[in-house]
Image (tube, rainbow, N blue to C red):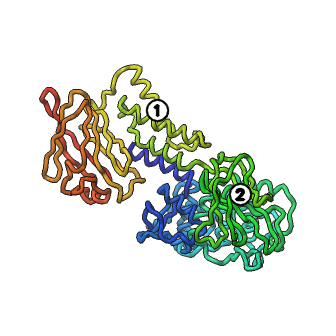
Amino acid sequence: MGYKSRLWKRTFLMSALVSMVATAEVSANVAFSDLNESYAAAEISRLAEAGFLNGYEDGTFRPAQAVTRADLAKILVLSLKLAEDPEAASEFEDVPEDAWYRGYVGALAKSGITRGTSQAAFSPNEPVTREQIAGFFIRAFGLEDKAGKLALEVPFTDIDQVSDWAKPYVALAYHIGFIQGIANADGTLRFAPGEHTQRQALARLAFEFNFNRDSFIEAANRIAKEPSGPAGSGTGAPKTPPGSSAGGGTGSTTAPGSIAVQQLTAIDQTTVEVTFNLAVSTVSSSDFAFDNGLTVQNASLKEGSGGKVIVLTTSTQTRGTVYTLSYKGRDSGVTVTGALPVREIQAAVDAIEALPSVDQLTLSHKQAVTEAREKVEAAKSKGAVDTDFANLNLLQEAEAKITDLESSGSQPESGQWIQSAFANIGGQRIAAEIGEDNVISFTLPGSIADSDRFTGFSIQASPDVQSISVTAMGMTKSIAFDQGTVHIDVSQILGGADPQGDGVSVSTLRSLAGGTALSIPATVTLQSGGTKQLTLVFNP
């Protein structure tokens, strides 16, 4: 569906996931090589699996690397779906006019989420500390006023090291379960306010902010109705216990030295991570039980967690349902909220995106439209709702067009003898736009990786078309239509670039295009003996 479809897809991504972007990063289409020791490996991998999280050229994610204020500005602006505003950054003398982050800094400053490090400085390359990120996100939640009015105690042994301005933010973020402390050897907690925020920490917080935002806001509203002690004045247990970092639930305090559940993380609809305060020596699925009908099918130790994280495989969670965990027969007091069916939603969004625009739609696309609807319904059966599909209106328009075509028994005039075309790239069917002057354009979606292979394409034409001759790399290949359809393998037209007969990589296709669109001339021969010229265009 061209550039508009990419915009619709981006709208979905921004409402569901945050894109981790840095200047030297590249798209992650394979597992990162350095996540074994990362406590946020599940969140990082989940986002990367969907193709919306970036790593580095060497295949790493660098989870322990510090996040800069410029990086965080972009992530928050995209998460909040704010419009870039370069002019609003003019007050900061250290934000160049040509900086990639200028629009994001301006938008963030205009929103009031940040005021810079001084009146004239934003310090874009400065690492973000743990207390600063608490302030950024509490303001992004819209909870700044509540944080300032509430008097909440926190159990951190280093609370005196937290800056006075940050104490309300840190306290509220802890009480709603958005941030957790760092365990000391004796089982107590510290916050380490001056330490730099790592990329893995930001991945987890961004995951929570996008998926469970309403739950955290509701938790803050509940806390606002309860009495509490002086802000940041003590190290005792909070009146409202800390929540899980994923799932928007609550947690429980525990005596030093006792093994207890600290937090739950809903990775997807059948995976929950359980984080303990201390290492667990044995693991058995029978030790874990949820209420509200959620069953535990398997339990395993998470590699690299030091024995503190157990991965539970569960029955399918119901989106929005709150589940309380019992451990070894005792209520842990920790809850998790049923996850969003992200995989199913993305499959439906992709299927809709692959459809041609309505003005190019013919009855030959009925099956593709039906399959897209089936994927939407599959996602909805797992808890998705219409608003989760940013481009659902396109599917509805396509369904209406198919109904009209069936009732009229006619094909649209546009396209004439060429009715539809699809390219097979990376296992996906990419629909073409049939433009004026008989130009068939294939535009690669952003989810296509350089390593994906282009294996061929299919064209459906009217019965008037007999054959097609394609000229590429100095050779012309003629192929006959069979019942109005022809399939052309890459090896038939780009044989020199496809010696194995398994297609060419997208990177090769882009190289052949030389940074622009790759145009391949072709001629169709009609049953009457006449000929028509057309052009196949690949926009990599």
Question: Is the residue 37 above or below the residue 508 in the image?
Answer: below
Q: Which mark is residue 484?
A: none
Instruction: Where is residue 456? Give x, y as percent.
Output: 28, 47
Disc 1 residue crowd, few under 14, some 14–19, many 20+, Cα 10 Å: few
- Percent across and percent down for residue 323 are 72, 51
Q: Residue at x 65, y 64 (%)?
A: 310
Q: Residue furthest top?
A: 408
Q: Amino acid at mark 2?
A: Ser
With 369 as the anchor, is 510 left or right in this view? left
Residue occupied by mark 1:
397
Q: Amino acid at mark 1?
A: Glu
Q: Nearer the viewer, residue 15 or 144?
A: 15
Q: Residue at x 47, y 48 (%)?
A: 9
216 vs 64, nearest the viewer: 64
In this rendering, position of residue 185 left or right of residue 444: right
* Any part of residue 159 in sight: no
Q: Secondary structure at mark 1?
A: helix
Q: Nearer the viewer, mark 1 or mark 2?
A: 2
Dots 1 and 2: beta carbons under 8 Å? Answer: no
Q: What residue lies at 46% left-to-right and 38% top-to-bottom?
A: 372
- The x and y percentages for residue 106 are 55, 62
Between 496 and 177, the one nearer to me in the picture: 496
**Quadrant position of the N terminus in the picture:** top left
Which residue position holds label 2?
286
Which of pointers 1 and 2 lies earlier in the amino acid sequence? 2
